[in-house]
Image (cartoon, rainbow, N blue to C red):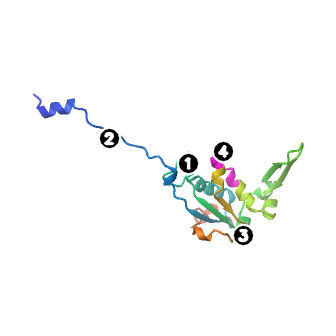
C-alpha cells in the first residue's frame, strides 16, 4: 500500500531549524555624530528627534537595555522657536532647598539670558528616561548658543530637521 520511502517519511522526525534572535552587544555599536541647526526650528519637534537619536531608536539594532545612541551637536540654540504663547507662558521651576524657596522663570527669559542652550537641554532631558542609562545618553548631547562648535574633527553629519516637515520650521 505505502512504499518504504513514504513510511520513513511519516515516522522519521524532520530536523527543525531554529530561528535565532539577534541580540545587540556593546561591541556591535557604531556611534556617529550629527549636527542640528536650531535656527527657526520648533523646540518640541526638534527635541523629539534629538532624543530619538540619543536613545538609538533610529537604528535597526536598537536594544532598550543598551545605550546604542549617537552623539548630537546643536548649534544656534538661542534662535530656536516656540509656538503659541509659550515664550511667556512656559515656566521653569527650581527650588533652593529652603522653605518657600521655589523660583520660576519663563522660557523667554532663559532664551534671552546668559545660557539659552538650557531650554533645549531641558526639553530633550524630559524626553529621555530618568535613570542611569538616561543620564549616560544625555552626556552625548552638546548644545551651543552660537554657530561655532569645537567638534569639527568628528566630521558630524548635518541633520536638516527644518526640511523634513513644513511644521518643523517657523518664521515668526
Q: Secondary structure at mark 1?
A: loop
SS type, badge 3: loop
Q: Which residue is mark 1?
A: 66
Circle 4 Cα neighbour tier, 10 Å, few/some/many (<14 / 14–19 / ≥20): few
Which is nearer the N-term, disc 3 or disc 2?
2
Magenta residues span: 123-134
> Is residue 15 or residue 124 the one in the foreground?
15
Is residue 95 in the magenta section? no
Distance between mark 4 and mark 2 Cα atoms: 39 Å
Q: Position of residue 70 (x, y in %)?
A: 58, 58
Q: Which residue is depicted at the point 63% across and 65% down?
A: 36
Residue hosting label 3: 146
Q: Which residue is the extreme one toward the front? A: 27
Residue, disc 4: 131
Q: CA distance from mark 3 to mark 1?
A: 32 Å
- Residue at 62% x, 48% y is 133
Of the numbered discs 4 and 1, the one sitting upstream in the chain is 1
User: Which quadrant of the view contains residue 171?
Assistant: bottom right
Amino acid at each position: 500500500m505505502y512504499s518504504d520511502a513514504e513510511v520513513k517519511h511519516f515516522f522519521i522526525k524532520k530536523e527543525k531549524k531554529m530561528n535565532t534572535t539577534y541580540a545587540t552587544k556593546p561591541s556591535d555599536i557604531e556611534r556617529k555624530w550629527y549636527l542640528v541647526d536650531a535656527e527657526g526650528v520648533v523646540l518640541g519637534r526638534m527635541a523629539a528627534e534629538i532624543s530619538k537619536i540619543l536613545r538609538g531608536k533610529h537604528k535597526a539594532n536598537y536594544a532598550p537595555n543598551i545605550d546604542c545612541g549617537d552623539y548630537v551637536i546643536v548649534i544656534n540654540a538661542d534662535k530656536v522657536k516656540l509656538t503659541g504663547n509659550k515664550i511667556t507662558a512656559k515656566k521653569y521651576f527650581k527650588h533652593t532647598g529652603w522653605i518657600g524657596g521655589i523660583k520660576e522663570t519663563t522660557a523667554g527669559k532663559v532664551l534671552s539670558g546668559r545660557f539659552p542652550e538650557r531650554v533645549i537641554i531641558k526639553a530633550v532631558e524630559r524626553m529621555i528616561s530618568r535613570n542611569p542609562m538616561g543620564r549616560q545618553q544625555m552626556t552625548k548631547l552638546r548644545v551651543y548658543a552660537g554657530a561655532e562648535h569645537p567638534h569639527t574633527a568628528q566630521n558630524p553629519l548635518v541633520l536638516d530637521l527644518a526640511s523634513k516637515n513644513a511644521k518643523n520650521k517657523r518664521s515668526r
